[in-house]
Image (cartoon, coloured by chain):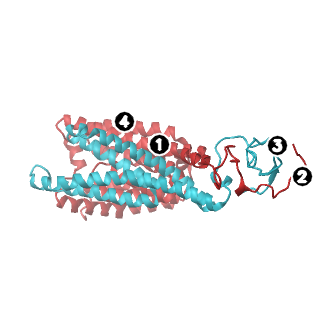
Amino acid sequence: MPLGDPEPELVSAPLARFCTRCGASLASGAIQCACFSEQRETGASLDQKQYSSDLKAVRSAMWLYFTLLLVSLSFAIWARANDGTWSVSADLISSSVSTAVVAFWSFAALRVVIEPLRARFNLAWLLAAMLLATPTYVAAHFTVEWLVALGIQDVNYLLIFQEEGYGLGWAVLLVCVQPAIVEEVAFRGVVQGSLNGVLGSRQALWVSALMFAILHLSIPSLPHLLALGLVLGWFRNRTNSLVPGMFLHFTHNLLVILHEAGEIPWV
Amino acid sequence: MAESTSPCPHCGAQNDSLAAFCGACGKALPDSRASGPRLVTAELPDSNAARQLVGEELKAHVKKAKGALLAVAIIQTIFALIFFPVARSNPEIASFVPFVVLAIAAIYWALFVWAGHNPLPAAIVGLVLYVTIHLLDAIADPSQLARGILIKILIVVALSRAINAGIKYRRLLPQLKQA
């Protein structure tokens, strides 16, 4: 067994007769062994740790979406069994259940939620958020108006609250406060936060806005909810915080209620 | 790729320091790297081959994602084309419904095109939309749930696999640029 100085030109890589990775003999003229393509098919060239953390992030976003979807669909079935209309008591329960669902998933993805909740931001963003709610509301209003003219039904939330004997306070709590907090934590917190690391901020913004719009299960609201989702997602990326978005969301929904109450005669 | 070489203790041939077996005699080399997941790009003999292999793998992932979305697009289009005239002549179905069905088919064609550049977001939106539409459909008319249940399950599985392929695509793409 010669252990002395080897001659470098003795065997060069392209002339190898055996695979230097698995030791199998190579077919004459072959440069690569079949074990390279086998490895390719098992996906071993991927960084497995990275892959499983990406998979976990995408799964947590998707499962949050599907659990919330199941909650709204269960209540849709329940509402239909009880004469088929949207009722405040059903909404009260479905809001509580979806709050619990979001709380559960927030704990599961605590890191992506807690950071944007604790992040400091310039207080001027709160003012900007509340001001921006006016154009988003006006856009939403006219989109719905136009679609209603095409024959799609719309709901007057406040009217239902009043018919069932709940005051404006309940309407503000259930239509403005609860969605503003819970939906922001869910979509801008868990979904956008998890997807940010996998998709990059721009695509995560679009995907979370689309999920936000689709989950509302309302065709007339779809276009303006997508726009609202994009604006809210942009605020989250720009300020690194969920709080300005919550203010925007709250003000937007408040304008809807105020309009229904006849307090905004100008649109 | 590391340029350093080391001699084979059995025949003396020079081998790449990353080699586990001697290229000349096929015997195991001492102190070879522990086996386990390794980067193809780091170990291939030249960067052109690496680029080609990663490129092929990327293509395979895009194909998987596009295939799943294409299947949904075709099925939704066929359904829309059959449903449209029926729904238009049925006064019980609201006038906007056939247009919504057409729009859904159009959305899946758009997702199919998007998947060519970005398979992951297209696959995520595709799965979210598919499950939402079909669960809503099942609630509106429970008899719809069982209809074509096998195809529905297959599509959900295909779209989930498309998401997996999309994740792999995103992580392999930088390797193509490095190679």
Q: CA distance from mark 4 to mark 1?
A: 21 Å
- Chain bearing tag 1 is A
- List the single residue furthest toward the front: A28
Instruction: Give the image location of residue A232, x and y in percent.
Output: 43, 57
Which one is nearer the viewer's eye here, A87 or B17? B17
Kind of residue at disc 2: Asp
- Chain bearing tag 3 is B
Crowd around label 4: few <14 · some 14–19 · many ≥20 (10 Å):
some
Determine which quarter of the picture holds residue A42: top right
Which one is nearer the viewer's eye here, A216 or A35? A35
Q: CA distance from mark 2 to mark 1?
A: 56 Å
Where, quadrant-wise, is the N terminus of chain A in this rendering?
A: top right
Disc 3 marks which residue?
A: B10
Give the foreground label among 2 and 4.
2
Residue drawn at point x = 33 percent, y = 51 percent: B71
Disc 4 marks which residue?
A: A97
Crowd around label 1: few <14 · some 14–19 · many ≥20 (10 Å):
some
Kind of residue at disc 1: Arg
Position of residue B104 relative to residue B152, above or below, is below
Mark 2 / mark 1, whichever is N-terminal:
2
Instruction: Give the image location of residue A24, x and y in percent.
Output: 67, 43
Q: CA distance from mark 4 to mark 3?
A: 70 Å
Determine which quarter of the picture holds residue A94: top left
